[in-house]
C-alpha cells in the first residue's frame, strides 16, 4: 500500500511540474510578444510613428459652397487628434495626408408620381494622397465619396450645412480607416 501511495504522489508531483513548465512558457510568450491593439480603431506603432502632417484640402470642384473646405479640414484634423496619439506637424510628418475636394454636385434621385423630382442627392468626392514615411508600402492615392439625400420640398440652402457636415464625417471616417486603422 505504501508503494502505491508513493507512486501516486510521484505522478502528482510530475503533473504539477508539467503545469508549472507550461505556465512559465505561456507567460514568457505573452511577455515577449507585443501586440498593437487599440479600442479606437487605430493600429499604429507609436514607437515608430509619432507625427502626422495633414494638409489643407482645397476645393477643386466646379460647384462650390464656401464653408465646405473648412468643415472638412477641421473634421479631418479633429478625428486624428481625438483618436490617435499622433502629434500634428506642419511638415516632415511620419504620416502625410493631403489632397483636394474634387467634386461637389447634386442630382435628382427620385421622381414623384407627377413627374417632378421628389428627392435630390448631394455628393462630395475627395482625392487623398497618403504617404507613410515609416513604411512606404502603405502609400496610396484614392478617392473617397459620400452622398446625402434631401427632399426637394426643402431648399439646398436650408440643409446644405447639415448635409456637408454629414458627408464630411463619412469621408473623414473612410480616410481614417484607410490610413491608420489597417482593417
Image: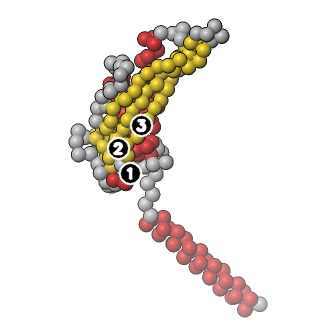
Q: Earlier in the sequence, mark 3 or mark 1?
A: 1
Residue on which the image places disc 1: 138
Determine the residue positioned at 30% across, 43% down: 96
**Gap in Å between the C-alphas at discs 3 and 1?**
16 Å
Q: Are marks 1 and 2 in contact (CB under 8 Å)?
A: yes
Marked residue nearer the N-terminal end (3 or 2): 2
- Closer to the observer: label 3 or label 2? 3
In the rendered view, would you say 174 is above or below 110? below
Name the front one of labels 3 and 1: 3
In the rendered image, is residue 149 in sight? yes
Q: Which mark is residue 130?
A: 2
Instruction: List the residue tagged with mark 3.
Output: 143
Q: Is residue 23 above or below residue 130?
A: below
CA–CA distance between discs 3 and 2?
11 Å
Could you tell me if the residues under marks 3 and 2 are in contact, i.e. CB atoms within 8 Å?
no
- Give percent across and percent down for residue 158: 45, 11
Nearer to me, 40 or 136: 136
| Residue at figure coordinates x 63%, y 79% from the top left | 15
Q: Nearer the viewer, residue 81 or 5?
A: 81
Label 1 – label 2 distance at C-alpha: 8 Å
Amino acid at each position: 500500500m505504501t508503494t502505491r501511495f508513493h507512486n501516486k504522489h510521484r505522478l502528482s508531483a510530475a503533473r504539477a511540474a508539467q503545469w508549472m513548465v507550461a505556465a512559465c512558457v505561456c507567460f514568457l510568450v505573452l511577455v515577449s510578444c507585443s501586440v498593437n491593439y487599440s479600442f479606437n480603431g487605430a493600429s499604429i506603432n507609436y514607437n515608430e510613428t509619432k507625427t502626422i502632417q495633414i494638409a489643407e484640402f482645397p476645393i477643386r470642384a466646379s460647384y462650390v459652397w464656401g464653408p465646405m473646405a473648412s468643415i472638412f479640414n477641421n473634421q479631418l484634423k479633429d478625428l486624428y487628434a481625438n483618436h490617435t496619439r499622433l502629434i500634428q506637424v506642419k511638415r516632415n510628418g511620419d504620416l502625410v495626408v493631403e489632397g483636394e475636394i474634387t467634386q461637389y454636385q447634386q442630382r435628382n434621385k427620385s421622381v414623384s408620381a407627377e413627374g417632378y423630382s421628389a428627392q435630390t442627392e448631394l455628393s462630395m468626392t475627395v482625392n487623398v494622397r497618403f504617404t507613410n514615411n515609416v513604411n512606404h508600402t502603405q502609400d496610396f492615392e484614392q478617392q473617397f465619396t459620400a452622398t446625402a439625400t434631401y427632399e426637394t420640398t426643402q431648399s439646398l440652402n436650408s440643409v446644405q450645412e447639415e448635409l456637408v457636415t454629414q458627408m464630411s464625417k463619412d469621408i473623414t471616417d473612410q480616410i481614417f480607416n484607410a490610413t491608420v486603422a489597417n482593417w
